[in-house]
Amino acid sequence: MSTETAPTADRVTAPPPAGWEEARSRVYAVGLAAALPAVARPLVDTDGSTLAEPLTTRTDLPAFPTSSVDGWAVRGRGPWRVVGRVLAGSTPAPLTEDATTVEIATGAMVPEGATAVLRVEESTSANGLVSGVPREAPEWRKPGEEAYADEELLPVGTPVDPAVIGLAAACGHDTLRVRRAPRAALLVFGDELLTAGPPAAGRVRDALGPAVPAWLRRYGCQVRPSDVVGPVADTLPAHVAALRSALANADLICTTGGTMNGPVDHLHPTLEALGADYVVNTVAVRPGFPMLLARLTGHDGRARFVAGLPGNPQSAIVALVSLVAPLLAGLQGRSMPVLPQATLAEAVPGRGDHTHLALVRLDRAAGTAFPVRHVGSAMLRGLAGADGFAVIRPGTSGEPGDRVPIVPLPLFPGERAS
């Protein structure tokens, strides 16, 4: 990891807060520039990962003419003499004589020489002869009907979900080249925090230590129990030691608390001591204003990132959806997340020259968003009943009927929103 350096003027002079949209774009760009290496994984281990190369077919799909019904593969005009049977998984002999037929099962290979497939329910058979009128439209799937050999079906950056895994298997793949999952760690700062039992005597229960790793996993990160450390003592040496240790293994380290410049806020001096550069240092958004993202270079030459989340729980989640989500999209080689929109069912106040991220519950069938209660920056009750955040842009307020962007809360890796 970078050697310790003395603070320089550009590190101690705080820049103005970045606009919320600007901050998202900036962190996505640095994440994409540091996209994680590609690895080959068995199909069963790829759910939630991201394609590092296009998904192509190894053969035509289907690879051979395939009957789409149970019935009779016939040649020429009927009635037809039965000369055999074809089941799925077998290779049939050609039909070489007119007025002959073989019984055929759905999914079986249509024999060479067949001119039609007659549905079993539209046929009659007696004395070894089959009669009926085949439908005009072919009753089999032609080679390449779905895709031709080597055709690109999905581009680089596609998230892998069960549908993609099934398609890859149908294409004949046993493995996929995907981006390595980001390894994340969490450092919890704050001597006032309890890790068990109810809050009392001036100390509060740590809500972020248990929750943030779960959010990170939903963004596709690997977070092991040993990657969660804290509370870290409120001293500069303890902060430096904890961050240096986490940087040895993690691509992303999230910290909670200490993002301001109070008497026991040591994150900024720690980043300076480790030679970090700020990508974003404070964002003009409420709640969550004192969030940050910094970058360091590891011994392997790859970038490492530190996301400073505010100590107030809802503010910390705002920082996750604002900075961590686009950063991880870039690291995984995905497109910048596109925000869906919904119609406000009730008024939402603005926050002056800051973007307001307001917790909302969605009625997806109606496409509407309802503000929730209990949304103070230190509260989690509203978050527990919400689906995401409505984006109220600076200098505006949200009125009923307004269409606004929605920042969705993350789902499980590979899961699609309803």
Image (spheres, helix red, strand yellow):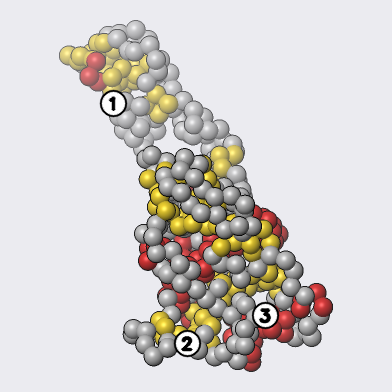
From the image, tell me which residue sits under label 2.
192
Drawn side of residue 151 relative to residue 381, left or right: right
Q: CA distance from mark 2 to mark 3?
A: 20 Å
Query: What's the amino acid at mark 2?
Result: Glu
Q: CA distance from mark 1 to mark 2?
A: 71 Å
Query: What's the amino acid at mark 3?
Result: His
User: In the rendering, at what x and y percent does residue 54 appear?
Assistant: 60, 46
Please give the name of the residue rendered at 47% of the width and 87% of the height, measured from the top-left corner: 192
Which quarter of the image is occupied by the N terminus?
bottom right
Q: Earlier in the sequence, mark 2 or mark 3?
A: 2
From the image, tell me which residue sits under label 3.
268
Residue placed furthest toward the right: 9
Local SS, label 1: loop
From the image, tell me which residue sits under label 1.
70
Q: Earlier in the sequence, mark 1 or mark 2?
A: 1
The residue closer to the viewer here, 63 or 201, is 201
Residue 168 in view here:
no
- Label 1 CA crowd tier, 10 Å (few <14, some 14–19, many 20+): some
